[in-house]
Image (cartoon, rainbow, N blue to C red):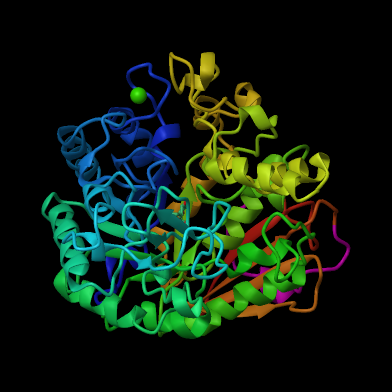
Amino acid sequence: MATAKSPWWKSAVIYQIYPRSFQDSNGDGIGDLQGITSRLDYLADLGIDAIWLSPVYRSPQDDNGYDISDYCDIDPMFGTLADMDTLIGEARKRNIRIIMDLVLNHSSDEHPWFLEAKKSRDNPFHDYYVWRDGNEDVPPNDMKACFGGSAWTWVPDVQQYYFHQFSVKQPDLNWDNPKVREEIYKIINFWIERGVGGFRLDVIDQIAKEPDLKITNNGPMLHAYIREMNRHTFGGTDLVTVGEAWGANVDNAKIYSDPSGREFSMVFQFEHIGLDQIPGKEKWDLEPLDWMELKKVLSKWQTGLHGCGWNSLFWNNHDLPRIVSRWGDDGKYRVESAKMFATLLHGMQGTPYIYQGEELGMTNAPYDISDYRDIETLHIYRDRLAEGYAEEDVMRSIHAKGRDNARTPMQWDGSKNAGFTVGEPWLKVNPNYLQINAAGECNTADSVFAYYKALIALRKKYPIFAEGDYQLLMGDDPDVFAYKRTWKEQTLYVICNFHAKKLNEVIPEEYRKGTLLISNYAEQGSSLKPYEARIYLEQRN
Ligand code: GLC
Ligand code: CA
Protein backbone atom coordinates (compact mmCIF):
# COMPACT_ATOMS: atom_id res chain seq x y z
CA MET A 1 0.00 0.00 0.00
CA ALA A 2 1.21 3.48 -0.83
CA THR A 3 1.77 5.85 2.07
CA ALA A 4 -0.29 9.02 2.22
CA LYS A 5 2.01 11.07 0.03
CA SER A 6 3.35 8.33 -2.20
CA PRO A 7 1.97 8.14 -5.76
CA TRP A 8 0.28 4.87 -6.74
CA TRP A 9 2.99 3.82 -9.18
CA LYS A 10 5.61 3.58 -6.43
CA SER A 11 4.06 0.40 -5.08
CA ALA A 12 2.77 -0.78 -8.46
CA VAL A 13 3.90 -3.61 -10.68
CA ILE A 14 3.64 -3.02 -14.42
CA TYR A 15 3.11 -5.80 -16.96
CA GLN A 16 4.26 -5.26 -20.53
CA ILE A 17 2.23 -6.67 -23.39
CA TYR A 18 3.60 -7.00 -26.89
CA PRO A 19 0.20 -7.04 -28.59
CA ARG A 20 1.09 -8.96 -31.73
CA SER A 21 2.34 -11.87 -29.65
CA PHE A 22 -0.08 -11.96 -26.73
CA GLN A 23 -3.43 -13.39 -27.83
CA ASP A 24 -5.03 -13.62 -31.26
CA SER A 25 -8.82 -13.46 -31.25
CA ASN A 26 -9.71 -13.82 -34.93
CA GLY A 27 -7.35 -16.46 -36.29
CA ASP A 28 -5.19 -14.21 -38.47
CA GLY A 29 -2.11 -15.24 -36.50
CA ILE A 30 -1.54 -11.81 -34.97
CA GLY A 31 -2.43 -10.86 -31.42
CA ASP A 32 -5.01 -8.10 -31.02
CA LEU A 33 -6.92 -5.93 -28.55
CA GLN A 34 -9.88 -8.28 -28.16
CA GLY A 35 -7.38 -11.00 -27.40
CA ILE A 36 -5.85 -8.90 -24.62
CA THR A 37 -9.28 -8.09 -23.16
CA SER A 38 -10.07 -11.82 -23.06
CA ARG A 39 -6.96 -12.41 -20.91
CA LEU A 40 -7.49 -9.65 -18.34
CA ASP A 41 -8.63 -12.09 -15.67
CA TYR A 42 -5.29 -13.88 -15.92
CA LEU A 43 -3.48 -10.57 -15.33
CA ALA A 44 -5.80 -9.58 -12.50
CA ASP A 45 -5.04 -12.93 -10.88
CA LEU A 46 -1.32 -12.25 -11.18
CA GLY A 47 -1.98 -9.01 -9.33
CA ILE A 48 -0.47 -6.37 -11.61
CA ASP A 49 -1.58 -2.72 -11.50
CA ALA A 50 -0.99 -1.55 -15.03
CA ILE A 51 -0.33 -2.79 -18.54
CA TRP A 52 2.24 -1.14 -20.77
CA LEU A 53 0.96 -1.80 -24.24
CA SER A 54 3.54 -1.72 -27.01
CA PRO A 55 2.22 0.40 -29.93
CA VAL A 56 -1.16 -0.49 -31.43
CA TYR A 57 -1.59 2.68 -33.51
CA ARG A 58 -1.99 2.64 -37.27
CA SER A 59 1.34 1.64 -38.71
CA PRO A 60 2.89 0.02 -41.76
CA GLN A 61 4.63 -2.28 -39.21
CA ASP A 62 8.14 -1.78 -40.53
CA ASP A 63 9.33 -1.92 -36.90
CA ASN A 64 6.26 -3.69 -35.49
CA GLY A 65 4.35 -0.53 -34.73
CA TYR A 66 7.25 1.66 -33.60
CA ASP A 67 6.63 3.44 -36.90
CA ILE A 68 3.30 5.23 -36.55
CA SER A 69 1.23 6.60 -39.41
CA ASP A 70 -1.74 7.76 -37.31
CA TYR A 71 -1.26 8.44 -33.59
CA CYS A 72 -4.99 8.75 -32.91
CA ASP A 73 -6.23 5.54 -34.43
CA ILE A 74 -5.77 1.80 -33.89
CA ASP A 75 -4.25 -0.36 -36.60
CA PRO A 76 -6.98 -2.56 -38.11
CA MET A 77 -4.69 -5.51 -37.46
CA PHE A 78 -5.15 -4.90 -33.72
CA GLY A 79 -8.80 -3.80 -33.80
CA THR A 80 -10.62 -0.49 -33.54
CA LEU A 81 -10.83 2.53 -31.24
CA ALA A 82 -13.97 0.92 -29.82
CA ASP A 83 -11.92 -2.18 -28.93
CA MET A 84 -9.44 0.11 -27.23
CA ASP A 85 -12.19 1.78 -25.21
CA THR A 86 -13.44 -1.66 -24.20
CA LEU A 87 -9.98 -2.71 -23.12
CA ILE A 88 -9.51 0.46 -21.05
CA GLY A 89 -12.92 0.00 -19.44
CA GLU A 90 -12.59 -3.71 -18.74
CA ALA A 91 -9.11 -3.20 -17.34
CA ARG A 92 -10.36 -0.42 -15.08
CA LYS A 93 -13.00 -2.76 -13.65
CA ARG A 94 -10.10 -4.94 -12.52
CA ASN A 95 -8.10 -1.98 -11.19
CA ILE A 96 -5.65 -2.21 -14.05
CA ARG A 97 -4.53 0.92 -15.90
CA ILE A 98 -3.48 0.98 -19.54
CA ILE A 99 -0.19 2.66 -20.37
CA MET A 100 0.24 3.68 -24.00
CA ASP A 101 3.59 3.54 -25.76
CA LEU A 102 4.30 6.93 -27.32
CA VAL A 103 6.80 6.92 -30.16
CA LEU A 104 7.53 10.62 -30.53
CA ASN A 105 11.10 10.71 -31.74
CA HIS A 106 10.02 9.65 -35.21
CA SER A 107 6.91 8.82 -37.20
CA SER A 108 6.37 6.44 -40.08
CA ASP A 109 7.38 7.67 -43.54
CA GLU A 110 3.73 6.90 -44.39
CA HIS A 111 2.41 9.41 -41.86
CA PRO A 112 0.49 12.18 -43.71
CA TRP A 113 2.98 14.72 -42.27
CA PHE A 114 5.88 13.02 -43.98
CA LEU A 115 3.96 12.40 -47.21
CA GLU A 116 3.47 16.17 -47.35
CA ALA A 117 6.91 17.06 -46.05
CA LYS A 118 8.71 15.28 -48.85
CA LYS A 119 6.70 16.97 -51.59
CA SER A 120 8.54 20.28 -51.57
CA ARG A 121 10.75 22.47 -49.44
CA ASP A 122 8.01 25.04 -49.00
CA ASN A 123 5.34 22.58 -48.02
CA PRO A 124 3.99 23.60 -44.58
CA PHE A 125 4.94 20.16 -43.23
CA HIS A 126 8.47 20.12 -44.60
CA ASP A 127 9.91 21.46 -41.38
CA TYR A 128 8.19 18.73 -39.31
CA TYR A 129 11.22 16.58 -40.09
CA VAL A 130 14.98 17.04 -40.09
CA TRP A 131 16.39 17.89 -43.52
CA ARG A 132 19.86 18.80 -44.74
CA ASP A 133 21.17 19.88 -48.10
CA GLY A 134 23.83 17.90 -49.87
CA ASN A 135 24.18 16.06 -53.08
CA GLU A 136 22.98 12.64 -53.89
CA ASP A 137 26.31 10.91 -53.41
CA VAL A 138 27.53 12.69 -50.31
CA PRO A 139 25.38 12.52 -47.19
CA PRO A 140 25.76 15.38 -44.68
CA ASN A 141 27.87 13.16 -42.40
CA ASP A 142 28.67 9.55 -41.63
CA MET A 143 26.05 8.94 -38.92
CA LYS A 144 24.60 5.44 -38.95
CA ALA A 145 20.99 4.39 -38.48
CA CYS A 146 20.16 1.90 -35.76
CA PHE A 147 18.79 -0.67 -38.17
CA GLY A 148 21.63 -0.53 -40.68
CA GLY A 149 22.95 1.90 -43.30
CA SER A 150 23.29 5.67 -43.20
CA ALA A 151 21.11 7.84 -40.97
CA TRP A 152 20.48 10.05 -44.02
CA THR A 153 18.19 9.23 -46.93
CA TRP A 154 18.05 11.30 -50.11
CA VAL A 155 14.74 12.54 -51.51
CA PRO A 156 15.17 13.59 -55.15
CA ASP A 157 11.98 15.73 -55.22
CA VAL A 158 13.37 18.15 -52.65
CA GLN A 159 17.06 17.53 -53.35
CA GLN A 160 17.67 17.02 -49.63
CA TYR A 161 18.41 14.32 -47.12
CA TYR A 162 16.14 13.50 -44.19
CA PHE A 163 17.51 12.24 -40.92
CA HIS A 164 16.45 8.93 -39.34
CA GLN A 165 18.06 7.38 -36.27
CA PHE A 166 16.20 4.12 -36.92
CA SER A 167 15.04 2.63 -40.24
CA VAL A 168 14.49 4.63 -43.47
CA LYS A 169 10.80 4.22 -42.74
CA GLN A 170 11.16 6.02 -39.39
CA PRO A 171 12.00 9.67 -40.21
CA ASP A 172 12.96 11.71 -37.12
CA LEU A 173 10.50 14.40 -36.08
CA ASN A 174 11.88 17.92 -35.72
CA TRP A 175 11.19 18.89 -32.12
CA ASP A 176 12.74 22.30 -32.69
CA ASN A 177 9.61 23.18 -34.66
CA PRO A 178 6.99 24.45 -32.16
CA LYS A 179 4.20 23.22 -34.45
CA VAL A 180 5.47 19.66 -34.11
CA ARG A 181 5.47 19.95 -30.35
CA GLU A 182 1.93 21.32 -30.39
CA GLU A 183 0.71 18.42 -32.54
CA ILE A 184 2.36 15.98 -30.15
CA TYR A 185 0.64 17.53 -27.13
CA LYS A 186 -2.71 17.21 -28.91
CA ILE A 187 -2.04 13.50 -29.43
CA ILE A 188 -1.14 12.96 -25.79
CA ASN A 189 -4.25 14.83 -24.64
CA PHE A 190 -6.39 12.77 -27.00
CA TRP A 191 -5.30 9.62 -25.15
CA ILE A 192 -5.58 11.20 -21.71
CA GLU A 193 -9.20 12.04 -22.53
CA ARG A 194 -9.82 8.44 -23.58
CA GLY A 195 -8.90 7.35 -20.08
CA VAL A 196 -5.44 5.82 -20.32
CA GLY A 197 -3.40 5.42 -17.15
CA GLY A 198 -0.13 6.77 -18.45
CA PHE A 199 2.56 6.71 -21.08
CA ARG A 200 5.83 5.03 -21.85
CA LEU A 201 7.92 7.39 -23.96
CA ASP A 202 9.98 5.59 -26.57
CA VAL A 203 13.66 6.66 -26.92
CA ILE A 204 12.72 9.99 -25.37
CA ASP A 205 16.35 10.94 -24.77
CA GLN A 206 16.82 11.15 -28.54
CA ILE A 207 14.19 13.77 -29.39
CA ALA A 208 16.52 16.75 -29.05
CA LYS A 209 19.07 15.49 -31.56
CA GLU A 210 21.62 17.78 -33.14
CA PRO A 211 22.73 15.84 -36.21
CA ASP A 212 25.25 18.44 -37.34
CA LEU A 213 27.11 17.86 -34.08
CA LYS A 214 26.45 14.12 -34.26
CA ILE A 215 24.42 14.36 -31.04
CA THR A 216 21.64 11.80 -30.76
CA ASN A 217 20.75 11.47 -27.09
CA ASN A 218 20.86 14.06 -24.31
CA GLY A 219 20.76 17.00 -26.70
CA PRO A 220 20.93 20.50 -25.15
CA MET A 221 17.18 21.16 -25.46
CA LEU A 222 16.07 17.75 -24.13
CA HIS A 223 14.86 18.69 -20.67
CA ALA A 224 13.29 21.95 -21.84
CA TYR A 225 11.18 19.99 -24.33
CA ILE A 226 10.20 17.35 -21.80
CA ARG A 227 9.12 20.01 -19.32
CA GLU A 228 7.09 21.83 -21.91
CA MET A 229 5.39 18.56 -22.87
CA ASN A 230 4.69 17.83 -19.21
CA ARG A 231 3.10 21.27 -18.67
CA HIS A 232 0.85 20.91 -21.72
CA THR A 233 -0.26 17.35 -21.07
CA PHE A 234 0.18 14.97 -18.12
CA GLY A 235 1.75 17.36 -15.61
CA GLY A 236 -0.25 17.53 -12.38
CA THR A 237 -2.30 14.39 -13.13
CA ASP A 238 -1.85 11.01 -11.46
CA LEU A 239 -0.79 9.37 -14.72
CA VAL A 240 2.39 7.34 -14.69
CA THR A 241 5.04 8.40 -17.22
CA VAL A 242 8.08 6.35 -18.05
CA GLY A 243 10.92 7.73 -20.10
CA GLU A 244 12.93 5.18 -22.07
CA ALA A 245 16.51 6.44 -22.02
CA TRP A 246 19.39 4.30 -23.26
CA GLY A 247 21.72 7.21 -22.61
CA ALA A 248 20.73 7.86 -18.98
CA ASN A 249 23.15 7.94 -16.08
CA VAL A 250 22.30 8.43 -12.42
CA ASP A 251 22.75 12.19 -12.65
CA ASN A 252 20.42 12.86 -15.51
CA ALA A 253 17.99 10.19 -14.27
CA LYS A 254 17.48 12.44 -11.24
CA ILE A 255 16.44 15.19 -13.60
CA TYR A 256 13.99 12.99 -15.53
CA SER A 257 12.38 11.56 -12.42
CA ASP A 258 12.71 14.40 -9.92
CA PRO A 259 9.92 13.99 -7.34
CA SER A 260 8.75 17.56 -8.05
CA GLY A 261 7.04 16.04 -11.10
CA ARG A 262 8.29 18.44 -13.74
CA GLU A 263 9.28 15.64 -16.12
CA PHE A 264 8.40 11.94 -15.72
CA SER A 265 7.45 9.55 -12.95
CA MET A 266 10.43 7.35 -13.66
CA VAL A 267 13.25 6.54 -15.98
CA PHE A 268 13.73 3.25 -17.84
CA GLN A 269 17.47 2.89 -18.28
CA PHE A 270 19.71 0.07 -19.44
CA GLU A 271 23.07 0.28 -17.74
CA HIS A 272 22.83 -3.25 -16.28
CA ILE A 273 21.65 -4.61 -19.61
CA GLY A 274 24.85 -3.64 -21.40
CA LEU A 275 27.14 -5.63 -19.12
CA ASP A 276 27.47 -8.68 -21.37
CA GLN A 277 28.87 -6.98 -24.41
CA ILE A 278 32.37 -5.85 -25.27
CA PRO A 279 32.64 -2.28 -23.93
CA GLY A 280 32.30 0.35 -26.63
CA LYS A 281 30.99 -2.16 -29.15
CA GLU A 282 27.53 -3.40 -30.05
CA LYS A 283 25.21 -5.75 -28.20
CA TRP A 284 26.07 -8.45 -30.75
CA ASP A 285 29.69 -8.41 -29.58
CA LEU A 286 29.23 -10.91 -26.81
CA GLU A 287 31.10 -11.08 -23.56
CA PRO A 288 30.22 -13.14 -20.47
CA LEU A 289 28.47 -11.19 -17.75
CA ASP A 290 30.73 -9.93 -14.99
CA TRP A 291 28.63 -10.59 -11.88
CA MET A 292 30.56 -8.19 -9.72
CA GLU A 293 29.80 -5.45 -12.22
CA LEU A 294 26.12 -6.34 -12.11
CA LYS A 295 26.13 -5.96 -8.32
CA LYS A 296 27.93 -2.67 -8.64
CA VAL A 297 25.68 -1.19 -11.28
CA LEU A 298 22.37 -2.24 -9.72
CA SER A 299 23.55 -1.01 -6.32
CA LYS A 300 24.68 2.31 -7.73
CA TRP A 301 21.20 2.97 -9.12
CA GLN A 302 19.55 1.89 -5.87
CA THR A 303 21.51 4.29 -3.71
CA GLY A 304 21.84 7.00 -6.37
CA LEU A 305 18.10 7.58 -6.84
CA HIS A 306 16.93 6.93 -3.29
CA GLY A 307 14.84 9.90 -2.17
CA CYS A 308 15.57 11.95 -5.29
CA GLY A 309 14.33 9.98 -8.29
CA TRP A 310 12.65 6.77 -9.36
CA ASN A 311 13.81 3.83 -11.42
CA SER A 312 12.17 1.05 -13.42
CA LEU A 313 13.22 -2.46 -12.44
CA PHE A 314 13.40 -4.94 -15.28
CA TRP A 315 15.30 -7.82 -16.85
CA ASN A 316 13.17 -8.17 -19.95
CA ASN A 317 11.24 -6.26 -22.54
CA HIS A 318 10.37 -6.66 -26.21
CA ASP A 319 13.91 -5.66 -27.22
CA LEU A 320 15.82 -8.01 -24.91
CA PRO A 321 16.48 -11.73 -24.73
CA ARG A 322 14.79 -13.78 -22.00
CA ILE A 323 16.53 -13.52 -18.63
CA VAL A 324 16.55 -17.25 -17.80
CA SER A 325 18.36 -17.97 -21.06
CA ARG A 326 20.57 -14.92 -20.82
CA TRP A 327 21.96 -14.98 -17.29
CA GLY A 328 20.16 -17.90 -15.67
CA ASP A 329 19.77 -21.50 -16.72
CA ASP A 330 17.02 -22.42 -19.17
CA GLY A 331 17.70 -26.15 -18.71
CA LYS A 332 17.99 -27.95 -15.40
CA TYR A 333 17.49 -24.91 -13.16
CA ARG A 334 15.04 -22.96 -15.27
CA VAL A 335 12.44 -22.68 -12.52
CA GLU A 336 14.95 -21.95 -9.74
CA SER A 337 16.85 -19.36 -11.75
CA ALA A 338 13.68 -17.64 -12.99
CA LYS A 339 12.55 -17.27 -9.38
CA MET A 340 15.97 -16.11 -8.25
CA PHE A 341 16.07 -13.28 -10.81
CA ALA A 342 12.54 -12.31 -9.84
CA THR A 343 13.52 -12.15 -6.16
CA LEU A 344 16.62 -10.07 -6.80
CA LEU A 345 14.66 -7.50 -8.78
CA HIS A 346 11.39 -7.37 -6.86
CA GLY A 347 13.24 -6.85 -3.60
CA MET A 348 14.65 -3.55 -4.86
CA GLN A 349 13.36 0.00 -4.83
CA GLY A 350 11.66 1.13 -8.02
CA THR A 351 8.73 -0.07 -10.09
CA PRO A 352 9.08 -3.67 -11.26
CA TYR A 353 8.16 -4.58 -14.83
CA ILE A 354 7.15 -8.06 -15.91
CA TYR A 355 7.39 -8.73 -19.62
CA GLN A 356 4.76 -11.16 -20.95
CA GLY A 357 5.81 -14.76 -20.38
CA GLU A 358 8.52 -13.83 -17.87
CA GLU A 359 6.07 -14.93 -15.16
CA LEU A 360 6.09 -18.39 -16.78
CA GLY A 361 9.87 -18.55 -17.08
CA MET A 362 9.69 -18.40 -20.90
CA THR A 363 13.02 -18.90 -22.68
CA ASN A 364 14.88 -17.73 -25.79
CA ALA A 365 14.02 -19.32 -29.12
CA PRO A 366 17.09 -20.20 -31.14
CA TYR A 367 15.61 -20.30 -34.64
CA ASP A 368 17.04 -20.43 -38.15
CA ILE A 369 17.49 -17.08 -39.83
CA SER A 370 14.45 -17.73 -42.04
CA ASP A 371 12.24 -17.95 -38.93
CA TYR A 372 13.10 -14.47 -37.64
CA ARG A 373 10.97 -11.45 -38.45
CA ASP A 374 12.64 -8.58 -36.60
CA ILE A 375 14.00 -5.78 -38.80
CA GLU A 376 17.02 -5.39 -36.52
CA THR A 377 17.95 -9.07 -36.66
CA LEU A 378 17.54 -9.29 -40.43
CA HIS A 379 19.72 -6.20 -40.89
CA ILE A 380 22.52 -7.30 -38.62
CA TYR A 381 22.59 -10.70 -40.31
CA ARG A 382 22.97 -9.11 -43.73
CA ASP A 383 25.41 -6.40 -42.61
CA ARG A 384 27.73 -8.63 -40.61
CA LEU A 385 27.93 -11.27 -43.33
CA ALA A 386 28.79 -8.50 -45.79
CA GLU A 387 31.49 -7.29 -43.39
CA GLY A 388 33.05 -10.74 -43.42
CA TYR A 389 31.89 -12.22 -40.10
CA ALA A 390 31.46 -16.00 -40.05
CA GLU A 391 27.81 -17.03 -40.26
CA GLU A 392 28.18 -19.18 -37.20
CA ASP A 393 29.30 -16.21 -35.12
CA VAL A 394 26.53 -14.00 -36.41
CA MET A 395 23.95 -16.63 -35.56
CA ARG A 396 25.45 -17.07 -32.10
CA SER A 397 24.93 -13.36 -31.48
CA ILE A 398 21.40 -13.45 -32.85
CA HIS A 399 20.50 -16.45 -30.72
CA ALA A 400 21.86 -14.68 -27.66
CA LYS A 401 20.55 -11.16 -28.25
CA GLY A 402 17.98 -11.04 -31.07
CA ARG A 403 14.74 -9.26 -30.19
CA ASP A 404 12.53 -12.07 -31.51
CA ASN A 405 13.61 -14.12 -28.49
CA ALA A 406 11.15 -12.01 -26.54
CA ARG A 407 8.54 -11.81 -29.26
CA THR A 408 7.57 -15.44 -29.75
CA PRO A 409 3.87 -15.97 -29.02
CA MET A 410 2.69 -16.15 -25.44
CA GLN A 411 2.45 -19.76 -24.27
CA TRP A 412 -1.05 -20.17 -22.88
CA ASP A 413 -1.58 -23.93 -22.91
CA GLY A 414 -0.61 -27.22 -24.52
CA SER A 415 -3.01 -26.95 -27.47
CA LYS A 416 -1.95 -26.17 -31.04
CA ASN A 417 0.18 -22.99 -31.24
CA ALA A 418 0.15 -22.83 -27.45
CA GLY A 419 -3.39 -21.44 -27.50
CA PHE A 420 -2.10 -18.20 -29.02
CA THR A 421 -3.92 -18.53 -32.34
CA VAL A 422 -6.01 -21.00 -34.28
CA GLY A 423 -4.33 -19.70 -37.43
CA GLU A 424 -0.73 -19.49 -38.58
CA PRO A 425 1.28 -17.45 -36.01
CA TRP A 426 3.22 -14.47 -37.44
CA LEU A 427 6.30 -15.76 -35.60
CA LYS A 428 6.82 -19.40 -34.69
CA VAL A 429 5.76 -20.56 -31.25
CA ASN A 430 8.67 -21.73 -29.10
CA PRO A 431 8.55 -25.56 -29.30
CA ASN A 432 8.91 -25.80 -25.51
CA TYR A 433 5.31 -24.62 -25.02
CA LEU A 434 4.25 -28.14 -24.08
CA GLN A 435 6.38 -27.92 -20.93
CA ILE A 436 6.09 -24.17 -20.32
CA ASN A 437 2.62 -22.66 -20.48
CA ALA A 438 0.22 -20.60 -18.40
CA ALA A 439 -2.36 -23.35 -17.92
CA GLY A 440 0.22 -25.61 -16.34
CA GLU A 441 1.77 -22.79 -14.31
CA CYS A 442 -1.53 -21.62 -12.88
CA ASN A 443 -2.31 -25.12 -11.65
CA THR A 444 0.98 -25.71 -9.89
CA ALA A 445 1.56 -24.48 -6.36
CA ASP A 446 5.31 -23.90 -6.70
CA SER A 447 5.34 -22.60 -10.28
CA VAL A 448 7.18 -19.53 -11.52
CA PHE A 449 3.77 -17.89 -11.95
CA ALA A 450 2.80 -18.58 -8.34
CA TYR A 451 6.14 -17.12 -7.24
CA TYR A 452 5.65 -13.88 -9.19
CA LYS A 453 2.17 -13.61 -7.78
CA ALA A 454 3.54 -13.98 -4.26
CA LEU A 455 6.24 -11.36 -4.87
CA ILE A 456 3.67 -8.88 -6.16
CA ALA A 457 1.49 -9.52 -3.12
CA LEU A 458 4.47 -8.85 -0.83
CA ARG A 459 5.05 -5.45 -2.45
CA LYS A 460 1.42 -4.57 -1.81
CA LYS A 461 1.50 -5.77 1.77
CA TYR A 462 4.77 -4.23 2.98
CA PRO A 463 5.55 -0.58 2.18
CA ILE A 464 9.21 -1.31 2.88
CA PHE A 465 9.50 -2.74 -0.66
CA ALA A 466 8.66 0.64 -2.15
CA GLU A 467 10.08 2.90 0.52
CA GLY A 468 13.06 1.29 2.21
CA ASP A 469 16.64 2.34 1.61
CA TYR A 470 19.24 -0.03 0.19
CA GLN A 471 22.54 -1.38 1.33
CA LEU A 472 24.61 -4.00 -0.46
CA LEU A 473 25.79 -6.89 1.72
CA MET A 474 28.64 -9.33 1.11
CA GLY A 475 29.86 -6.92 -1.55
CA ASP A 476 33.05 -8.87 -2.32
CA ASP A 477 31.38 -12.24 -2.66
CA PRO A 478 31.48 -13.37 -6.30
CA ASP A 479 28.52 -15.76 -5.99
CA VAL A 480 26.09 -14.17 -3.58
CA PHE A 481 24.00 -11.11 -4.32
CA ALA A 482 22.64 -9.93 -0.98
CA TYR A 483 21.28 -6.62 0.19
CA LYS A 484 19.18 -5.16 2.92
CA ARG A 485 16.39 -2.62 2.84
CA THR A 486 15.57 -0.55 5.89
CA TRP A 487 12.44 1.41 6.69
CA LYS A 488 11.11 2.53 10.05
CA GLU A 489 11.26 -0.48 12.41
CA GLN A 490 11.77 -3.03 9.65
CA THR A 491 14.62 -4.53 7.68
CA LEU A 492 14.38 -6.79 4.64
CA TYR A 493 17.20 -9.13 3.78
CA VAL A 494 17.33 -10.33 0.18
CA ILE A 495 19.83 -13.12 -0.37
CA CYS A 496 20.48 -14.81 -3.71
CA ASN A 497 22.90 -17.30 -5.17
CA PHE A 498 23.21 -16.31 -8.79
CA HIS A 499 24.97 -19.45 -9.90
CA ALA A 500 24.14 -23.09 -10.59
CA LYS A 501 26.56 -24.33 -7.96
CA LYS A 502 25.82 -25.08 -4.35
CA LEU A 503 27.75 -22.62 -2.18
CA ASN A 504 29.91 -23.42 0.83
CA GLU A 505 30.11 -20.04 2.47
CA VAL A 506 27.78 -19.52 5.40
CA ILE A 507 25.29 -16.68 5.16
CA PRO A 508 25.70 -14.63 8.35
CA GLU A 509 23.13 -15.56 10.96
CA GLU A 510 22.22 -11.93 11.37
CA TYR A 511 20.72 -11.82 7.87
CA ARG A 512 18.56 -14.87 8.45
CA LYS A 513 16.97 -14.29 11.79
CA GLY A 514 13.77 -12.56 10.60
CA THR A 515 10.61 -14.15 9.22
CA LEU A 516 11.08 -15.85 5.88
CA LEU A 517 8.75 -14.08 3.44
CA ILE A 518 9.56 -16.09 0.34
CA SER A 519 12.07 -18.57 -1.04
CA ASN A 520 12.43 -20.78 -4.10
CA TYR A 521 13.37 -23.81 -1.95
CA ALA A 522 11.26 -25.57 0.66
CA GLU A 523 14.06 -25.74 3.22
CA GLN A 524 16.72 -23.23 4.16
CA GLY A 525 20.15 -24.14 5.42
CA SER A 526 23.06 -21.96 6.50
CA SER A 527 24.37 -21.74 2.94
CA LEU A 528 22.73 -21.49 -0.48
CA LYS A 529 21.65 -24.17 -2.93
CA PRO A 530 21.87 -23.59 -6.72
CA TYR A 531 20.09 -20.33 -7.58
CA GLU A 532 18.60 -20.21 -4.12
CA ALA A 533 16.82 -16.99 -3.21
CA ARG A 534 15.26 -15.81 0.04
CA ILE A 535 13.72 -12.72 1.55
CA TYR A 536 13.54 -12.26 5.31
CA LEU A 537 11.71 -9.56 7.19
CA GLU A 538 13.02 -8.46 10.54
CA GLN A 539 10.75 -6.44 12.78
CA ARG A 540 12.51 -4.46 15.49
CA ASN A 541 10.65 -4.06 18.81
C1 GLC B 1 12.72 1.64 -28.75
C2 GLC B 1 11.79 0.46 -28.85
C3 GLC B 1 12.22 -0.42 -29.98
C4 GLC B 1 12.15 0.37 -31.26
C5 GLC B 1 12.96 1.67 -31.16
C6 GLC B 1 12.58 2.62 -32.26
O1 GLC B 1 13.99 1.30 -28.34
O2 GLC B 1 11.73 -0.20 -27.63
O3 GLC B 1 11.45 -1.59 -30.08
O4 GLC B 1 12.64 -0.39 -32.33
O5 GLC B 1 12.72 2.35 -29.96
O6 GLC B 1 11.29 3.13 -32.08
CA1 CA C 1 -5.71 -11.14 -34.76
Residue 506: quadrant of the picture: bottom right
In which quadrant of this rendering is ligand 2 seen? top left
Q: Residue at x 13, y 54 (%)?
A: 190
Residue 506 in magenta stretch: yes
- Which is more toward the observer, 323 or 541? 323
Query: Which residue is pictured at 16% across the width and 39% down the height?
Result: 85
Determine whether 531 is above or below 91 in the image: below
- Percent from the top left, x then y, of residue 396? 77, 43
Q: How many numbered badges does the structure rendering display?
A: 0
Q: Nearer the viewer, residue 87 or 444?
A: 87
Which residue extends farthest right?
504
Give the left or right position of residue 453, taking residue 387 as reference: left
Quadrant assignment, res 161? bottom left
Give above or below for 329 relative to 209.
Answer: above
**Is residue 391 left or right of 202 when viewed as pictured?**
right
Instruction: Confirm whether residue 541 shows in the render.
Output: no
Q: Residue at x 80, y 65 (%)?
A: 479
The x, y position of residue 494, in whole percent, is 62, 66
Name of the residue lying farthest toward the left: 193
In this image, 143 relative to 327: left or right? Answer: left
- The quarter in which the N terminus is drawn is bottom left
Which residue is pictured at 57% across the width and 25% down the height?
428
- Residue 84: horizontal and vertical position, in percent? 21, 38
Q: Is residue 518 above or below residue 210?
A: above
**Residue 497 falls within the magenta-colored stretch:** no
Residue 366 in percent (x, y) is at 70, 34
- Observer-nearest residue: 309 or 68? 68
Asked whether the viewer can see residue 53, the reply is yes
Magenta-colored span = 503-521
